[in-house]
Image (cartoon, rainbow, N blue to C red):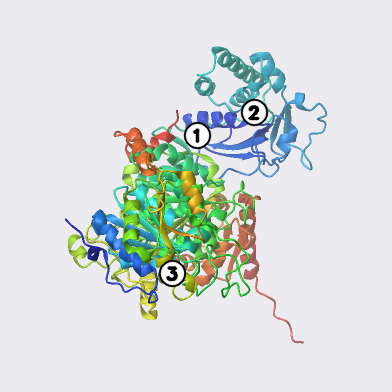
Amino acid sequence: MVYTPQDYKSELKPIWCPGCGDYGVVQAIYRALARVGRPPHEIAFVSGIGCSSRIPGYTTAYGFNSVHGRALPIAQGIKIARPELLVLVAGGDGDGFSIGGGHVAHAIRRNVDLTYIVMDNQVYGLTKGQLSPTSPRGLRTVSSPDGSLEDPVNPLLYVLGYGGRFVAQGTPADLAGLTQLIEEGIRYPGFAFINVQSPCVTYGSPDAQLKAHKSAMKSLASLRHDVNDRLRAMELAGEYGRSLYTGVFYCDPDPPASYEALVAERRRAMTDPDASRARVLETFALH
Amino acid sequence: MTTDLVIGMAGAGGDGVIAAGEALMTAAARSGYRAMMTKSYGPQIRGGECSFRLRIGTGEIPNAGTMLDIAVALNWDDFLRFGAELPVDGRTTVVHDPAQDARLDPLPLEGVSPSEAVAVPITEMARASAGTEKAKNTIVLGLLAGWLGLPADRLLGGLRKRFARKSPDVLAGNERAFAAGLEFARTHPLGADRRLSAAAPPPSPRWLADGNEMCAAAALVAGCEFFAGYPITPSSEIMHFLGREIWKHGGTVLQAEDEIAGIGAVIGASFAGRKAMTATSGPGMSLKSEMLGLATIAEVPLVCVNVQRGGPSTGIPTKSEQSDLFQAAFSAHGDAVRPVLAPVSVADTFRITIDAFNIAEQFQTPVILLSDADIAQRKEVVDPIDAGAFSIVDRRRPNERELEHYARFQITESGVSPISHPGMEGGNFLASGIEHTECGAPTASGEVHAQMNEKRIRKFAPLKARRDLFSIEGDRDAPIGLISWGSVAGVVSEATALARREGIQLKLLVPRLLYPVSEEIYEDFFASVRAGLVVEQSHQGQLFRIIRMFVDVPRGVESLARSGSTPITVHDVLDRVRQMVVTFQRRRVPQEEPSLG
């Protein structure tokens, strides 16, 4: 069966503000899913809390709009329990790099085959405009009226630093490019991370809107960046906040087996066809 | 001869104290005795002092007993560190090794003279017979076999198994040590007769298990396919057991990066259609609270075990307490009701764990299984359990017709709606922590929120009516009613039996379902009650207070509650019950009318 982007679009109307970057992200997800071609019921789409975390509900997949910062553990449980599913994870920069930041490192090192899409807008939109972990130093917000005193997290370096094997960045200003990245992330056999610069039209800075992206974005392909060069990828990722690179920063050409593949292997090796659950209790017999 | 005996022993790490206790317990179990063993360790990570107390009897062993009948001190410094675990009184026989401390007159026991003190040159005998001090524990086994009349061949058989992998010299040395202990006992009979009456041979060989292992094994029998958790005392052995066993049955164990991720992965696995469990202790429960709320509103079945320890915060991690009941019942924000179950013993842990899974699946809810360090860590002789006799419940899946216009959170008569999982065609829905309509669409409608809260709470009505989750001992119409739960219930059960033997009319109610409160079952119980006690190991008396929130408790019913680490004893309960009877009798005497001149 051939799927169209429309097959992945649900009837729910997004609550996002007109002009929000997330509209473009969800469009790119519909398109990427159609290209991958898995039926919606074989997809689990997990998110945390935030404007962007509403996204699973706008698809026809099995969705899970969970609690703030905890999408990754839930998604890993789903994928390990049912590895045949395609599992997508999405959320904002606060969800992924502030309240849930501790889980990112472990999802990476465990290498469960998930595609993690972060809609990074450098501000908390749902709670009405406070600092986020990726807000630039000095940013004035309702929670930092005199300017932020902290450096931002660099999500790209964060993931590369923990050994991320597929790291990309896109913007809805380049919908075709973003679609391509999401598709590649889904097809990548292991944990894939895509940071999407998705502007907040209401609380975001005026020079970080889609229009500005169009002129600022620089494709990594045009720089002839070698996606297998991890050190160069880290150098380029270090430009986060200054340059808007789009495309794949790093893609490990030789990915190891995913966590759930290792689990399946162990299960195959250890499953005892004669082991009956009722006989587990025999372990308590006196030896 | 005696039918019931409590032995305590303490020594330094490496003295083989725990191995001796386990050898005694195994031999006792093989000989048809019932037994219960608790272990205590010093706070050191490795190599500190350790001790066991072992109660052996011909009948049921409801608790680990109070005062020691026989106390074995391999050295006094270590023994005295376990004052609360190894109490000595005037009826105790104290066995000690003079080599460890020459200045032993009087014994270093403050305020008590034991019935007798037997100095046994244990170290010297070990060196002479086995050529090594390491055989001290085997000397003690020989001594106890002789004084208690435990079958020497069973203990020897155990030694042979234990040392099977060591060199033949080690085994031969231990056999000589055992014989030396036995010979010492023969030539030095105790003043008090400590011989155990013979036990009736059991219909089939009994088992040995502790609560954590039993919980993990029951989870497998219940169909658990996924476990994720984070190490924490005193619950980690549940993860250890499943880490060894679950793979054989096609399941998975994940050691998560933290407590939150542990329950998160469990919610994910259950959402994906697998039966799943996590286990922790109080601090971990605090971290899991938000996720438990998510499981309640998204109606995700799961079992969350809390092996309680002394709290709050780090508290006393190695000691048992029953102080997490408020947390279990009330730590959720919003109107979240979730079942809280508590087993009373190792054997009971099997049934209650199966029930926890069945309830989680039937009602699509997180279930909190409140075990405690006492049950989790103690070993009991248990009767063989026929796992096949327990029915296993699976969540209600939507049928083809229901999938045509599937509404995951459909408001049904029972409040339970058929649940699909990813991979099931036509069952697609959005699970969410945000309030949702029957179809799963996010909503801020107050009307829908009220209906959904009502649905999610109404579905527990059949659970509250389950009388099989309550046991009653004693006289049905007794005026004195006791209530207790968890590991302390075994203490109260023995006190109940003793009081009834004294002619006191009383009854004991032991709930396994602690929350939601089954008003009707308590009201029926209280119908005849004029006085009573709710007995529990917490400072506030948490069950007592929760029952009073929902039930009109008779005025004479009081709380008998104490913080953990100083266990409530049979005598504590018995004394209070006797006082109640006296109070009844005082009331019977008519007051003299004041004369008005």
Image quarter for residue A42?
bottom left
* Vertical arrangement, residue A11 with respect to residue A284, above or below: below
User: Pointer 3 and pointer 2: residues touching (CB < 8 Å)?
Assistant: no
Give whichever of A139, B309 is nearer the camera. Answer: A139
Where is residue B423 shown, x and y percent of the image?
Answer: 26, 54
Residue on which the image places disc 3: A212
Distance of label 3 from label 2 (alpha carbons): 71 Å
Bin the neighbour count of mark 3 within 10 Å (Cα to Cα): few under 14, some 14-19, many 20 and up: few
Label 2, secondary structure: give it: loop
Image quarter for residue B282?
bottom right
Chain bearing tag 2 is B
* Vertical arrangement, residue B445 with respect to residue A248, above or below: below
The amino acid beneath tag 3 is Ala
* Camera-side mark, 3 or 1: 3
Label 1, secondary structure: give it: loop
- The label number, if any, that marks residue B474 in the structure image: none
The amino acid beneath tag 1 is Tyr
* Camera-side mark, 3 or 2: 3
Label 3, secondary structure: give it: helix
Q: Residue furthest bottom?
A: B597
Chain bearing tag 1 is B
In the picture, which quadrant includes the N terminus of chain B? Answer: top right
On the rendered structure, is A268 left or right of B484? Answer: left
Give whichever of B232, B194 is nearer the camera. Answer: B232
Bin the neighbour count of mark 2 within 10 Å (Cα to Cα): few under 14, some 14-19, many 20 and up: some
Q: Residue furthest front?
A: A223
